[in-house]
Amino acid sequence: MSFFFRMASRLRPSTPEEVVRSIKDSFHALHTKTGAKALEEVEKNLSSLRQMLSGDGEAEPNHEQVLQITLEICKEDVLSLFVQNLPSLGWGVRKDLVHCWCILLRQKVDESYCCVKYIENHLELLDFLVGCYKNLDVALNCGNMLRECLKYPALTKCILESSSFELFFEYVELPNFDIASDALNTFKDLLTKHETVVSEFLSSHYEQFFELYTRLLTSTNYVTRRQSVKFLSEFLLEAPNSRIMKRYITEVRFLNIMITLLKDSSKNIRICAFHVFKVFVANPNKPRSIIEALIENRRELLKLLQNLPTSKGEDELDEERNLITQEIQKLACPSA
C-alpha cells in the first residue's frame, strides 16, 4: 500500500513553487554530510527542470508554467545557486544547468526579462562567470552562459564597465586553445552585439581599451597576434565604429604597430594588418604626424606593399594595394 502511495505521489504534477523549492533544497544540501545524495537530487531536479522548460520531445512545454517557474526561480535566488555551485557539478548536470539558464533568461514576464533583471541586481554572478575561465572544468559552460547574457544590452554594459572585463585580455592568451578560443568568442560578442553600448563604452574608455588591445597586437603568441589584428580589421571598418576608427587612424603609435605587423612572417597577419594600414593612408584628413611618419618610412612601406602576399583571384586586394602605393608615392611634406 505504502509503495503504491509513494509511486502515486511521484507521478503527481508538482507546482512551480514545489519544483523550485526542491531544486533550492538540493543545492543547499550539496555542502552537507549528505552531499553525495544531494548531488543525485540536483541531477534529477535539473533534468526535470530542463524537461519542464523545453518539453520532452513529445509534448511542448506549458508556457504559463514556464513563466511561473521563472518568476519563482528569481524570487528564491536559485539563479545565484546555479552559478555559485556550477564548479561542484558533474559534466552532464552542468550541461542541463546551462540549457535551463539559457531558456530562463529568454522568458519575458509583463514586458520584462525577469532573470536578466535579477542578474543586473546581482552583478557578482557575472564576475563569477567571467572568473571561471580560469577553471578548466567549467570554463566552456561559463562561456555559454556569458554569451547568453550578452544578448541583452544591459548585461553587456555591466560586463564592459566591470573590472572583470580586463581579464579577457589575459584569457585570449590562455595556453588551453579551446578555452582561449571560447574567451575570444565571448570577447567578440561583447564588442559587436550592441553597437550603441559599445560605442559609448569605447568613447569613455578609449585609452584604457586600446592600451590593453595593443598588448594583443604585439604579443609573442602567433595565434593572439593573428586573431587580434583580424578582429581589429573587421571591427574598425564597421559603420557603427566610424567615430572610434577616425580617432584610431590619427595616432602614429597605432600606425607604427601596423607597419610592424606588415613585416610579420605570417601571410595572414600581413594581409589583415594591410586592411587597417590602408585606412591610415586613405584618410583624406591625415594629421601632419601621420603624413610625416609615412614619408619617413616611404621606401620601406613601398617595398612591403610590393611584397604583400596575394592569391589568385584576389583582384580587390591587388587594386587596393596599388591605390595605397600611389597614395604613399605622391605624399609631400606638409608646409609648416
Image (cartoon, helix red, strand yellow):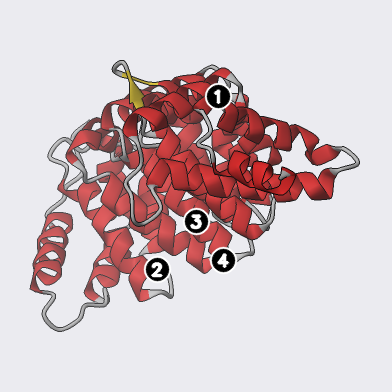
Badge 4: few (under 14), some or many (20 or more) residues near its Cα, within 10 Å? Answer: few
Q: For residue 263, which numbered disc appears in the image? A: 2
* Residue 320 in view of the camera: yes
> What separation in Å lies between label 3 and label 4 (alpha carbons)?
8 Å
The amino acid sitting under disc 2 is Lys
Q: Which comes before the other along the chain, label 4 or label 2?
A: 4
**Residue 85 vs residue 30, the one in the foreground:** 30
**The quadrant where residue 27 appears:** top right
- Which residue does the numbered mark 1 point to in the structure image? 17
Q: Which residue is drawn at 29% across and 67% down?
A: 271
Q: Residue at coordinates 68% horizontally, 50% vertically from top-left?
A: 134
Eye-nearest disc, 3 or 2? 3
Q: Which sits earlier in the primary sequence, circle 3 or circle 2? A: 3
What amino acid is at disc 4? Phe
Q: Which of marks 3 and 1 is nearer the N terminus?
A: 1
Residue at label 3? 182
Q: In this view, does 7 lie above or below 250?
A: below
Q: Do the residues labelled 3 and 4 touch (CB within 8 Å)?
A: no
The front one of 285 and 108 is: 108
Dot 4 falls on a residue whose secondary structure is helix
